[in-house]
Image (cartoon, grey):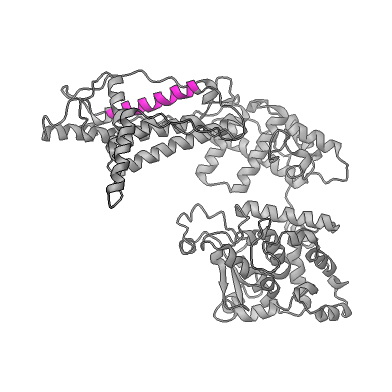
Amino acid sequence: MDAAFEQLMDREPGSLDPVGSEAAVMRAVRDEVVRRATEARRRRGPDPIQRGRPPMPEASLPDAVAAQLAAYVSGLEDADEPLPVPADLAAALIAALPSPAPHTAFPSRTAAAKERSLAALGRAAFMRGELASNNLATVEPLVRAALERAGTPAPQVIPPVLLEAGMHGAMAGFREVAAQEVAFRPNPGGTAQSVEAQGPTPAPPPSALPHLGAAARPPAPPARPAPPAPLSPDTPLSVAFHAFRKAKRVDRAWKQDAERDAETTIRLFTEFFGDLPLRGITRELVREFRGNLLEVCSDWGQAAEYADPTDPKGNRRVDAREVLRISRSRPSTVKRLSTKTINKNTSALSGLWKWAEADAGCEGLPNPTQGMQKKGKGAAQRQAAREAREAFRVSEIQQAFTSSLWRSWSPLDAALSGLRPAGQASRYFGVLFGAYMGMREREIVQLRRGDVEVHGDDLVLLHVRPLAGADYAAELGIGRHRQAEHENVLKTVAADRVVPVHPVVLRLGLLQYLRLRGGSEADLLFDDVASPEKGARNLSRSFLALRRTLGITRPALDFHSLRHSARTMLNGLRVSRDDLDLIFGHENASDRNHVREVYQKGNWHRPLAVALAMLTWGVGEFGEDPRALDQMRRDGFVLCK
């Protein structure tokens, strides 16, 4: 950049004052931005932790700026078209108007720092817009201050090339301020400490800008960042896990669920025993950790007893030691964490140790989890566990659909003509999709508006498909399909299918909900779903609360039991196995999905819809004919007993 600037000087000698190279101006303006932000941070002091947003301070415009603004406003009244704001007036207003007061409705100073980081990024984006519109006068005061502070008097008229360099320097400075606000650095003691806790970052000493009269050399290329220091047996567990998680992200070796589970494991371990060095974590501590988890109730992540009383929203959980104390005080009949969950926590620690020994410079570090995990179940045991899941009886399904709690989730009013503010669409229609269409909870909550295909009022199809394909993502208008791959996931290849919507679901207002809700093709089908992962979890928990309210607490029952119940009912109604496999997305082992290739083309969706419409739970309010159930009872069908 310096060389290009000097070539410009050679072509047009004397056109610019010798104030310095473009790269030097960029560095000076960047340092000036960081210095001002540092002084503002020092004057601000600790962030108050309070609720609400304080009022914005009143503006105090200089007389000259006020007169200039008044002249501009009077010119607007006489002009036929809107006039652009003059560059000098815009710069004066930016300098004179106060900045918005920081939003302090956060539970911690870290959250406030994140907001200030976003504000700095917004200023950088504003500078980028000014540069794109060639409005260079906005940065002129900042360039003058930076040049004077660096020991070089600014010319009366600053050349545009230096103002452009100042724009780039200001953008770089604001980005650096944003990084400093949210940065966390390890202190000599090994624990993480925020930059704000360490005190304001001192401004760099001023350096004189090189003059063009001297033979300026092109700046040396920036040095490559040093590789991260290898771990050692004395590295704290939290620091080692941070490096481990970064390596997993780079290698794309973790799914979102696995990363979240590993973070929970490390948090629980450090809350139980402290942030110990790797060499200090022994097999005895791991055994104690597993023993503590064995006493923790399985609902500690959802039950109100474990909510943090200091959190105003009650979303956070209490410390691990407090979780253990509360779990020990609860009755022994409350379900505890399963062996599978405890093994999953042990696997997270084992994976960290294996990585540290193989790739992070901790050769010979003994693994304290060696041999503690029980061997996984064999194929026969896994099949037996799946078959152990029970199906709902007809009376239990009827009890659920006539309950006041399920009705309260309806997103529509009684006339199906308006949306209810308190409705929970994913829970209301989710139970319907599970009972009448046999869909999995993850398949339900990841549906998008573009997945609904309407063929009149009597045939509506749902496309169950992943977002990994670039064509489908482009069809929905999602350009970042690679980042959305984990949002829509399917259990098997056969799960990619087209499911007809049951007539009962249509009678209860699915199409009316789509019409009233609106939105784009890429939007999630249900407006109360933030993400497919959270939506599936909330749907399962809500259905569990519904069952407990109704007293349906038989073992081996869960949301997936609705899928078992629907297939069992259709099988009892003599629907062919080929049609069942197409509806439920099951693999047909006899012909390797040849039936799927034939049936999922052309007009073969309507026969599937006719077969699915045979499914009935005998709910009179839904207009269902009970004669089919009566015949099944006479035949001794088990779910009708």
Please check the rendered image and state whether residue 38 is part of the magenta-colored stretch, yes or no. yes
The answer to which image quadrant residue 369 occupies is: top right
> Residue at the location (78% across, 63% down)?
387
Is 477 located above or below residue 284 in the figure? below
> Which residue occupies 61% across, 70% down?
511
Residues 299 and 46: in front is 46
Dividing the picture into quarters, in which one does residue 427 lie?
A: bottom right
- Which one is in front, 413 or 231? 413
- The quarter of the picture where the C terminus appears is bottom right
Provide the residue span drawn in magenta.
Answer: 25-43
Residue 140: image location, x then y, percent: 28, 31
- Residue 393 seen in the current view: yes
Horizontally, is 334 left or right of 256 in the view? right
Residue 585 seen by the camera? no
Query: Quadrant where the N terminus lies?
Result: top left
Using residue 226 as the reference point, say whether residue 569 is left or right of it.
Answer: right
Q: Is residue 418 above or below residue 273?
A: below
Residue 262: percent from left, percent from top: 64, 41
> Which residue is at the front of the view, 496 or 200?
200
Q: In the image shown, does 48 or 114 lie closer to the viewer?
A: 48
